[in-house]
Image (spheres, helix red, strand yellow):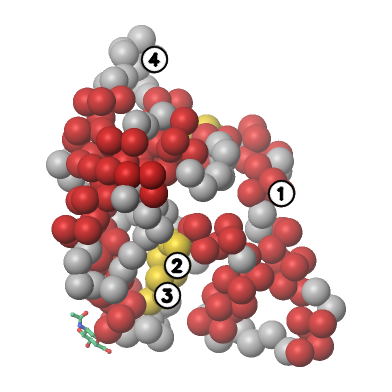
Amino acid sequence: MFSTHIPYELLPKTILASKCLVVYICRNPLDQFISHRHFLIENRIEKNVEPLDIDEAFEMFCKGIHPFGPFWDHMMGYWQASLNNSRKVLFLKYEDLKEDIVFSVKKIAEFIGFHLSEEEEKHGVIEQISRLCSFENLKNLEVNKLGKTRVIQNSSYFRKAEVGDWTNYLSPSMAERVEELMQMKLRGSGLMFNSYCKDSS
Ligand SMILES: *[C@@H]1O[C@H](CO)[C@@H](O)[C@H](O)[C@H]1NC(C)=O
Ligand SMILES: *[C@@H]1O[C@H](CO)[C@@H](O)[C@H](O)[C@H]1NC(C)=O
């Protein structure tokens, strides 16, 4: 088992040809932008170089300038793949996981062919798995508090894990811009995110 950020189109052909299963988790783009920004700033190699200011970074994000490509292409690649072959690719949203972890754990278990018996469900196995994999539990593991992989502090993978934290950093007009971008780029695909600019509608 391994994790990666690379776009679907760039996955090695052996992954697609093998029996390897793909679980894709995407996050709403605004939280993703803020999360990635914190990660980059915390792990920047040249600590004395000022990071891009947030407006400039946001401008690049909206233009699709990003180490893993534009967010809309990234999502759509895995989204289309999951529609085309739902036994190979499972598409999940971070927000759904946060809302109902039990439902999502069950879904993942079924997808990987690990069916939980009624007995196991009754005994709270799903809740136990959810607790083991929870943000709080993982964040507090020794390896994630103190470990390091080359220049990256493991602890920087665990920040807040909150839906909607972008509201503390981005303006309503920035959110509107991303919303418009998504409406344009994801149109007709069936992929949708909850509206961010409820006040403006
Ligand atoms: C769709 O899935 C089939 C296998 O079910 C595969 O052969 C084909 O390449 C896929 N097409 C796309 C566009 O992903
Ligand atoms: C955390 O750090 C350790 C080494 O200190 C490393 O072996 C491990 O793979 C890292 N974990 C993650 C999730 O990067």
Q: In the rendered image, which quarter is residue 184 located in?
A: bottom left
For discs 3 and 2, the disc positioned in front in the rendered view: 2
Q: CA distance from mark 4 to mark 3?
A: 38 Å
Identify which residue, 104 or 9, lies in the foreground: 104
Rendered residue at 66%/58% (across/down): 133
Residue underneath mark 4: 47
> Pointer 1: what residue?
137
Q: Which residue is mark 2?
A: 92
Q: SS for tag 2?
A: strand
Lower position in the chain sequence, tag 2 or tag 1: 2
Q: CA distance from mark 4 to mark 2?
A: 35 Å
Give the alpha-carbon distance from disc 2 to disc 1, as whole Å: 21 Å
Q: Residues within 10 Å of mark 2 (few under 14, many from 20)?
A: some
Q: Which circle's residue, 4 or 2, is located before the other in the chain?
A: 4
**Marks 3 and 2, how far apart in space?**
6 Å
Answer with mark 4 or mark 1, whichever residue precedes in sequence: 4
- The 10 Å Cα crowd at callout 1, few under 14, some 14 to 19, many 20 or more, is few
Residue 11 visible within the image: no
In the image as oriented, which residue stretches furthest toward the right?
A: 123
In the rendered image, residue 132, in percent from the top left (x then y), is placed at 72, 58
Residue 152's disc is none
Q: Are marks 4 and 2 in contact (CB under 8 Å)?
A: no
Q: CA distance from mark 1 to mark 3?
A: 25 Å
Q: Nearer the viewer, mark 4 or mark 1?
A: 1
Q: Amino acid at mark 1?
A: Asn
Pointer 3 residue? 90
Name the amino acid type tagged 4: Lys
Inspect the image, locate mark 2, and give the three-letter code of the amino acid beneath it. Leu
Measure how far apart labels 4 and 1 are at the Cα level: 30 Å
